[in-house]
Image (cartoon, coloured by chain):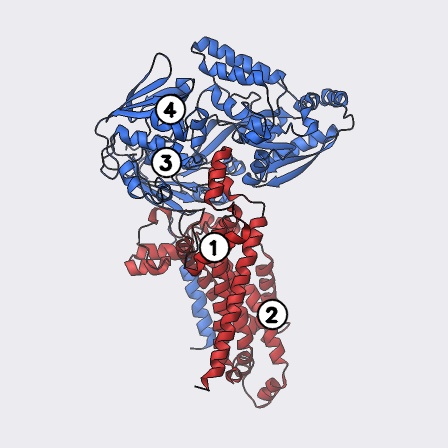
């Protein structure tokens, strides 16, 4: 055979291969294929997880005691706990657990497992311990405060005064206090690690799906548990695929190779808006986008400067042009939509007023500072917009971009001037959820290292505000409690805070119209057990 | 016995060089990794963790020890065959590398077959038809291949061949619904599908592989064809070529049997280096195609500051180049008898 013939044969083979097996099928009727960026998915351990993506997976592998209704967040629904009771003095919560529930291993689920799982979160003291520690639980007291008087009863005694409804919301919304199969996990514990290493890539739950496997930054598959106590899930299998590139996600949604795509860039989401086969589900989260100032910086310690900055942000323009799809205008430290949330104060860009305030503060010509921001959208565009309006008033803010842990790392170290970021919990439908994260700062000393409080990170401290927050939390009359939260927001506003909310986060998910009963959850606890798909060849099919 | 001594000396000299190279690589990577402004602890505990949790994990990871002690602990583990655990996956790094490397091996091997299989003949033809239409065409193709950003090429390739024409599969190694259908044995999807006797998965995997491999192959082709052309031009201006022509040999014989044979050794180095670069990780193509390969793993680990994983990867890359160098040396002896002496 001559070289020419050999080359020809090679080319022909290549073309044949390229064109072969090219039939593209839609996703199977009994499988849900979800595309998402799984870069932040580092562990499946409910006690150690960070980020929304993993919560959405964990709540489908495990069951919690309670759930929040995605359509009416303040409505707490029974899950493993079929009933619960708050003691008259608001200090103890008692749960009656469902009978006959079994883990995927076949072990019976008892209240001893629930107690062990909760103690485990505090003993491990990893990412999910933070909220519970803020409620007063510690390694030292958790063994006394959480108990199982019998196989179906669980009691939680609150270590310090708290609103028991907030605790119920946390139990339902955080996903950290799901119930683990203590026997299975203990069998895999190494060096007293409470099974942490094993649970990084395994599960020991009782949820509607069991984990088939997870390969980091590749694929996570789970299949339905046939004996699930609520009845088997509609989908046989759920596949989560790591797709880092938003445009790849978009192409695969258009082709029908994915049923659901999350974490897509908003321009790509917008491009799919008119696709008749796809829908866009937007869900408002409690997290806020903000401009933060460090009061360790003498410029921003001056209330006149902070007030000037309040009028140097084009809130309306930013939300209309840059935040569309990412967030909606919001200027209060408590998430929108709750009875305790005051209407927005209506701050707008007001250059003349800002210049006057700067002159009164002693900076008629402005000053130099830095503006830290994640090298990601929409943060970067928002920072550029703010930089531009600051510049008009003479404040020369040099933008420093970085990854999440570089930007928030600097904030945790109180080493920043200005910062555009996102935070504020807001997972629980309770004003304290945001206030705890964004405003509360019980000790402003550097040595306190209260890095989980953004109030501390910005060095914003007001003893009266702290005490108002503490009192509002324990107020038992709902009407008075609401009034107390109104007062907190008013005082926060008067103090001219170091952290100015700009927008409340919106999460957009693209869903193929074949997917039915998919309800994105504002707390990221999206349940997939009832999701089903219209069979490919049948319009309006049934599960 | 005495005859074997020089051989032994050569082997021990090479082994020492390899050892020093790998040690230097590890040392450099470790210290560069430690001065990078990345905080793996924060990635693990999340930005909202309190200080006590942060400190606990910081201590657990051994970051409170002096740098030299951390490096010593790592080396000690390495000598016991332990590359440590990756933060990204919680798994032993060796296990992770064994998982991700076959995906890249499969991609890079097909890519180099395409790149060298087309690039070498094109380079030879371009040199033989110097300044002719074919030469210009090859040079334009090479230039395009070399200067087109691979990331952009990947997106356009997906848009055209996957989204519009539907000729090839999309992202991933197989259709998502076929994930995990064949048991993993070698980690090479095509081989595993064949071993499982599953034709559907085999064709599907090939269908997913062909586009990223062709794009990478095109990139390598550009480099290989340009190098081949310039090696061939150098040979074709030699006097022995003139002699061959005077002897009345056909042009085909002159080019392929005389000129081409003389560039084989140089070409081997070029192809080996190109293959090494592909194995090292075609990060951008792996990102666009969501290819769970080595480059993607290395980059993610680096962004996380996960030094156990990064150093494991660096070690593998070092070994790849050492092995490719050894292979080139061996093949030199096959193609150039003078090197046997």
Marks 1 and 4 in Cβ contact (< 8 Å):
no
Work out how far the residue at label 1 is from the one at label 4, CA to CA, in angstroms. 46 Å
**Disc 2: which residue:** B135
- Foreground disc of the pair 1, 2: 1
Q: Position of residue B188 (x, y in %)?
A: 37, 59
**Mark linked to residue A58:** 3
Query: Callout 2 environment at 10 Å: few (<14), some (14 to 19), or many (20+)?
Result: many
Q: State the mark number for residue B74.
A: 1
Circle 2: element type: helix
Q: Are marks 1 and 4 on the same chain?
A: no
Chain of the residue under the numbered disc 4 shown in the image:
A
Question: Where B254 falls versus B176 (above or below)?
Answer: below
Q: Colour of chain A?
A: blue
Q: Secondary structure at mark 3?
A: helix
Tell me the CA gap for discs 4 and 3. 15 Å
Query: Chain under label 2?
Result: B
Q: Is residue A367 above or below residue B13?
A: above
Residue reaching furthest to the left: A100
Q: Is residue A199 left or right of residue B277?
A: left
- Chain letter, colour red: B
């Amino acid at each position: 055979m001559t070289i020419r013939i050999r080359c020809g044969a090679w080319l022909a083979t290549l073309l044949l291969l390229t064109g072969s097996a090219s039939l593209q099928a839609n996703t199977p009727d009994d499988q849900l294929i979800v595309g998402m960026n799984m870069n932040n998915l580092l562990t499946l351990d409910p006690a150690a997880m960070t980020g929304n993506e993993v919560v959405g997976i964990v709540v489908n592998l495990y069951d919690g005691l309670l759930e929040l209704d995605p359509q009416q967040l303040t409505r707490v629904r029974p899950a493993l706990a079929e009933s619960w009771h708050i003691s008259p003095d608001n200090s103890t919560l008692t749960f009656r657990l469902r009978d006959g529930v079994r883990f995927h291993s076949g072990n019976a689920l008892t209240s001893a497992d629930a107690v062990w799982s909760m103690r485990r979160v505090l003993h491990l003291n990893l990412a999910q311990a933070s909220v519970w520690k803020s409620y007063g639980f510690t390694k030292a007291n958790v063994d006394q405060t959480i108990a199982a008087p019998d196989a179906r009863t669980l009691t939680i005694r609150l270590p310090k005064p708290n609103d028991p409804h907030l605790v119920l919301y946390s139990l339902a919304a955080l996903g950290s206090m799901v119930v683990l199969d203590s026997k299975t996990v203990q069998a895999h514990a190494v060096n007293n690690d409470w099974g942490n290493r094993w649970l990084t890539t395994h599960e020991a739950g009782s949820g509607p799906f069991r984990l088939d496997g997870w390969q980091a930054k590749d694929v996570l598959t789970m299949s339905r548990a046939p004996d699930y106590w609520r009845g088997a899930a509609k989908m046989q299998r759920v596949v989560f695929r790591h797709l880092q590139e938003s445009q790849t996600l978009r192409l695969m949604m258009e082709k029908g190779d994915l049923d659901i795509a999350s974490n897509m860039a908003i321009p790509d989401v917008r491009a799919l808006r008119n696709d008749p086969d796809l829908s866009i589900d937007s869900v408002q989260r409690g997290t806020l986008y903000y401009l933060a100032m460090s009061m360790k910086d003498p410029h921003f310690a001056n209330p006149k400067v902070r007030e000037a900055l309040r009028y140097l942000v084009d809130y309306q323009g930013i939300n209309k042009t840059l935040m569309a799809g990412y967030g909606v205008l919001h200027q209060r430290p408590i998430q929108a939509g709750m009875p305790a949330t005051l209407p927005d104060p209506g701050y707008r860009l007001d250059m003349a007023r800002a210049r006057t305030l700067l002159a009164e503060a002693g900076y008629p010509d402005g000053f130099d500072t830095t503006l830290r921001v994640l090298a990601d959208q929409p943060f970067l565009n928002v920072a550029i917009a703010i930089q531009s309006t600051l510049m008009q008033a003479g404040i020369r803010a040099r933008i420093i971009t970085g990854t999440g842990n570089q930007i928030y790392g600097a904030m945790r170290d109180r080493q920043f001037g200005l910062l555009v970021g996102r935070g504020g919990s807001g997972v629980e439908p309770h004003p304290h959820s945001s206030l705890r994260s964004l405003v509360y700062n019980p000790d402003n000393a550097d040595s306190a290292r209260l890095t989980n409080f953004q109030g501390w990170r910005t060095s914003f401290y007001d003893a009266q505000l702290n005490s108002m927050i503490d009192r509002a939390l324990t107020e038992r009359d709902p009407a008075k409690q609401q009034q107390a939260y109104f007062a907190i927001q008013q005082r926060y506003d008067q103090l001219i805070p170091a952290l100015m909310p700009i927008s409340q986060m919106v999460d957009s998910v693209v869903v193929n119209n074949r997917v039915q009963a998919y309800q994105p959850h504002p707390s990221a606890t999206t349940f997939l057990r009832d999701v089903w798909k219209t069979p490919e060849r049948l319009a309006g099919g049934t599960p | 016995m005495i005859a074997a001594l020089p051989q032994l000396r050569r082997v021990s000299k090479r082994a020492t060089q390899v050892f020093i190279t790998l040690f230097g690589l590890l040392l450099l990577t470790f210290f560069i990794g430690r001065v990078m402004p990345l905080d793996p602890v924060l990635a693990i505990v999340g930005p909202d963790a309190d200080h006590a949790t942060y400190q606990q994990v910081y201590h657990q990871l051994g970051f409170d020890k002096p740098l030299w002690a951390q490096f010593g602990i790592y080396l000690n583990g390495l000598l016991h065959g332990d590359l440590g655990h990756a933060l990204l996956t919680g798994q032993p790094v060796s296990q992770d590398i064994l998982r991700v490397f076959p995906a890249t091996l499969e991609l890079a091997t097909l890519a180099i077959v395409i790149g060298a299989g087309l690039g070498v003949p094109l380079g030879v033809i371009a040199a033989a038809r110097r300044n002719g239409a074919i030469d210009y065409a090859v040079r334009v193709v090479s230039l395009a291949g070399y200067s087109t950003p691979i990331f952009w090429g990947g997106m356009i390739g997906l848009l055209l061949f996957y989204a519009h024409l539907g000729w090839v599969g999309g992202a991933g190694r197989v259709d998502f619904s076929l994930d995990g259908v064949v048991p993993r044995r070698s980690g090479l999807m095509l081989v595993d599908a064949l071993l499982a006797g599953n034709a559907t998965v085999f064709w599907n995997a090939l269908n997913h592989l062909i586009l990223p491999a062709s794009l990478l192959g095109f990139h390598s082709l550009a480099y290989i064809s340009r190098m081949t052309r310039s090696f061939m031009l150098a040979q074709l201006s030699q006097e022995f070529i003139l002699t061959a022509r005077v002897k009345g040999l056909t042009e085909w014989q002159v080019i392929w049997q005389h000129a081409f044979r003389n560039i084989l050794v140089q070409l081997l180095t070029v192809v080996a280096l190109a293959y090494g670069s592909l194995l090292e990780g075609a990060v951008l193509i792996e990102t666009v195609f969501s290819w769970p390969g080595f480059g993607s793993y290395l980059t993610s680990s680096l962004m996380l500051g996960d030094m156990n994983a990064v150093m494991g990867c660096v070690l593998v890359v070092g070994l790849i180049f050492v092995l490719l160098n050894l292979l080139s040396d061996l093949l030199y002896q096959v193609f150039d008898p003078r090197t046997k002496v």
